[in-house]
């Protein structure tokens, strides 16, 4: 029985090892700086999209972070600080859940950028926002990293990846607004 348990444990370690190495490589990339990091906001109140008639300038009309979402944002910020990841700039979608995630994770008032707006109910804005994202990538800092707090639908439209809440998708600029997705890190679990 013990021998079988050891074999299962060894198999689990083998399966997890490539993931750990991938995360290590991504953390090293972030440590170097010059990356663009899309971060999906933390967990929100239940629902899909926002309530009818919501207003961007009135958080009480939107889906907002729960205590669990605030804790996710805290863990993201703590992990970045613990690993010595430099943050050059923090931008956020104008939705309250993104602004709050950025404030908690980075301890700063983020600059709001419509490029990061929610595309869930506004798919008609995709091409305009993708063009804006390419401009942000082209202007990525060489020192530190550009942190973009946004929505899952927006991240998916830009990168093809639908992240979990508070998950980071790391994008490496390749010049001229072109980029490649380096990978993703979920630290808030």
Image (spheres, rainbow, N blue to C red):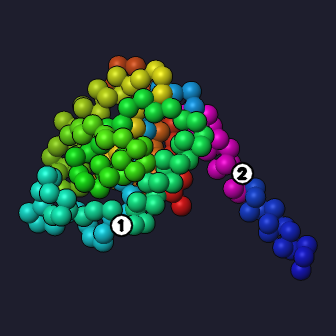
Between residue 106 and residue 119, name the one nearer to us. Answer: 106
- Graded by Cα atoms within 10 Å as few (under 14), some (14 to 19) or many (20 or more), the crowding at tag 1 reads some
What range is drawn magenta here? 15-30
Residue 15: quarter of image:
bottom right
Which label sits on residue 66? 1
Rendering coords of residue 34 (x, y %): 47, 26
Rendering coords of residue 135 (x, y %): 29, 26
Cβ atoms at labels 1 and 2 below 8 Å apart: no
Q: Residue at x 25, y 54 (%)?
A: 96
Helix, strand or loop at mark 1: loop
Q: Residue at x 79, y 69 (%)?
A: 8
Q: Is residue 77 left or right of residue 2?
A: left
130, above or below 40, in the image: above
* Residue 175 seen: yes
Between residue 5 and residue 87, name the one nearer to us. Answer: 87
Q: Report if residue 75 lies within the magenta region.
A: no
174, above or below 1, in the image: above
The residue where tag 2 is placed is 17
Rendering coords of residue 98 (x, y %): 31, 51
Q: CA distance from mark 1 to mark 2?
A: 33 Å
Q: Is residue 97 left or right of residue 87?
A: left
């Amino acid at each position: 029985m013990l021998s079988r348990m050891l074999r299962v444990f060894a198999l689990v370690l083998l399966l997890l090892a490539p993931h750990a190495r991938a995360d290590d490589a991504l953390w090293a990339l972030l440590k170097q700086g010059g990356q663009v990091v899309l971060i999906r906001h933390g967990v929100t109140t239940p629902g899909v999209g926002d309530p009818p008639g919501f207003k961007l300038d009135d958080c009480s009309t939107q889906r907002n972070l729960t205590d669990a979402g605030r804790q996710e944002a805290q863990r993201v910020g703590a992990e970045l600080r613990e690993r010595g990841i430099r943050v050059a700039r923090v931008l956020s979608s104008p939705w309250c859940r993104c602004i709050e995630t950025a404030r908690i994770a980075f301890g700063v008032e983020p600059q709001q950028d419509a490029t990061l707006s929610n595309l869930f109910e506004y798919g008609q804005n995709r091409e305009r926002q993708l063009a804006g994202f390419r401009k942000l990538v082209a202007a990525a800092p060489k020192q530190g990293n550009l942190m973009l707090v946004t929505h899952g639908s927006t991240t998916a439209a830009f990168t093809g990846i639908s992240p979990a809440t508070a998950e980071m998708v790391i994008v490496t600029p390749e010049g001229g607004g072109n980029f490649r997705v380096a990978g993703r890190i979920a630290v808030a679990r």
